Amino acid sequence: MQMETAHAATDASGRILVGTSGYSYAEWVPAGIYPAGTRPGGMLPAYAAAFPATELNYTWYQMPKAAALERMLAQVPPHFRFAAKLTRSMTHEVEPGQWRGQAARFRDGVAPLLRADQLAAVLVQLPPTFHRTQAHRRYLAALLDELAGLPLAVEFRHVSWAADRVFAELERRAATLVAVDVPALPDLFPPLDVVTSADLFYVRFHGRNTRGWRSGHMQQQFDYDYADSELREWVTRRIAGMARRARRGVVFFNNHVRGQAALNAHRLAGLLAAEGLGGNAPWTAPSST
Amino acid sequence: MDRAVIHLNVADFAVAVERSRDAHLRTRPLIIAPGGSPRATVFDMSEEAYGAGVRKGMDLRRAQRLCREALVRAPCMACYERAMHDLVRQARPFSPQVEPGEADGHLFLDVTGTGRLFGPPMDVAWRLRRQARADLGLDPVWAVAPNKLVAKVATRLVKPDGEYIVGAGEEEAFLAPLPLHLVPGIEGDDLVRLGEFNFTRVGQVTALGLEALRVPFGRRAGFLYGALRGEDASPVRAVGQQPPRAVFDRTFAEGTQREAVLQGALYVLVEQAGAFLRRGGLAARRLAVSLDFSDGVRRARQRRVQPATANDANLFALAREALHLAGDRRVRVRHLRLTCDGLTFPPAQMALFPGDPEDDRRQHLVTALDRIRQRFGAEAIRVGRTLAA
């Protein structure tokens, strides 16, 4: 696919934003997502010309820094939105005595996005080993308290959290439950259309690569190309209903290998537009370099 | 293609290795210093000992007064080299270009173009750190950047704990607010000169532009301007493909300032280097003398060897010049290192005109010494000046 000729459907009012998990992938240049010769420094402006939102994955590896995010804001239009993944020191590698300080640093780091009203959500992705135990429930409650005031979206990866009491608690806190599309494997949090926040629904498409999911290699885990029928099913059976129950929505594709995420996001945006769930906005062609 | 370089840096490497070997050492401040000498100096110390005022090169007795609860362990260089080897072994599956430091906990990887195999560079760095923690008990900080220089600054910035990602094109903005001394290659003399202009931050200097920098710095301005803007084209060398060189060391347990001792020790190192080169049929085109002072300062000076030689007397003449340049401080020297690199095969072509007879005599002398040592052992004959060392 050539981005120059593509058109994405994004809601003109910004009601449902479709994008990808991360945008800085060198392999997206040979895949034709970015024009030939696009350097890493030029990827965000090129991406923002094509999509209305992105997930910042790097903030999982590294605590966000306000100065870096200010530089990123300068490269995108005012209507562009970021979802920032919560840093691993609060989700996957929690150190009991330190995570509260980390939460404060995270809040400071994303402050420029909040000030600019360009923070769609803070994605609190919890690891598959984070089962629904008493200790984990307490920790999650304390974490959400610590991050109160930020637009929080919680992604569970273990099935034990698929319980009405969990959803009710998220709703009480006005925190978004992240809906996921994943392979049909035991123990994984299932695909649901539960909406726990009237402000925002949040969908993540991880791909359905059953064999690669637990390979330990991202390139296998997220190597998947959604068929139109699979996307259409999501639109009609889940997203349409979710859109009625929340004012805004974000949908991100994480199957980044060979640029499949960008292609699938483009197709889903088109399907949403066809269903009248999003006004069509032309996919502005990025400038070729 | 923009490069992606990972730098792993294990803070206080000697301490980290000792603590990975003995869990009891994790609960107390730790000082690494040679034992058995009343005037031993600190080789390395833990963060807690640093916080109490202990510094590298400090007299051990003073260090112990400053941090009374500290445990003291003797350095185990073989252990540190093994730990480096283990770090390299873990990194090698991710890239053929892995460049370790000298048993100092530093490791560079060039992961350019490996994304389709292993995922994003930051994920590789994170996995390496996780492996080092799980398998080796070491906890490196890491950085991903477009080159070695910027990656190294980034780990310096977050040390002793953390990580930093600098994207391509962000190098100059990343460096601009930082103190000048964080940038590798900016030496003490440069800092003094820049300090005279009241420059303390990188951005203040780069804002001047290259032409203005040429006025006080002359030809060095080009290097300074490039480094301060985060430019560095130096490659990450593959393991086993380091440029060949000969390195010989001498440690003074109590430190010394005596000229005769230093020169004697240097001559011993020159003899060792010369013998090494001659055994391999090689000659050096450059030599460097590096001094570690007892106050923790390290200074190195180098000399070009023209023509390339393996002759002890010729090498020593240049090494002594380098020693004088590096050693003009009134501080005891703790460690002396001689490095010969730019190794080449000596010119085989006969001289067109008769050579300097003095050179011939030196060559004959070295050949005779080599023969005696081969037959009767290295200690069978010594040059007088080495008796003081």
Image: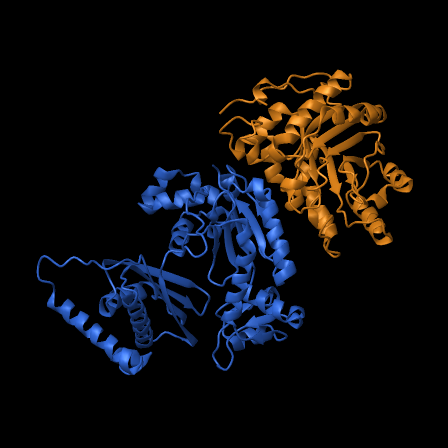
Chain colours: A orange, B blue
Q: Nearer the viewer, residue A244 or B211?
A: A244
To which quarter of the image does residue A111 belong?
A: top right
Question: Horizontally, is B99 left or right of B68 in the view?
Answer: left
Question: Horizontally, is B171 left or right of A134 in the view?
Answer: left
To which quarter of the image does residue B160 belong?
A: bottom right
Residue B148 in picture, x, y percent from top left: 47, 48
Residue B72 in picture, x, y percent from top left: 58, 75
Q: How many marks?
A: 0
In the image, residue A130 sits, relative to residue B78, either above or below, namely above
Residue B282 in picture, x, y percent from top left: 28, 62
Residue at image x 40%, y 43%?
B225
Q: Residue furthest left?
A: B353
Q: Nearer the viewer, residue B218 or A91?
A: A91
In the image, residue A142 sits, relative to residue B275, either above or below, namely above
| Residue B55 seen | no
Q: Nearer the viewer, residue B18 or B45?
A: B18
Q: Nearer the viewer, residue A260 or A10?
A: A260
Question: Horizontally, is A138 left or right of B29 in the view?
Answer: right
| Residue A223 seen | yes
Residue A58 in picture, x, y percent from top left: 63, 41
Q: In which quadrant of the rendered image does the C terminus of chain B lie?
A: bottom left
Question: Horizontally, is A94 left or right of B112 in the view?
Answer: right
Residue at image x 31%, y 45%?
B219
Q: Residue furthest front?
A: A211
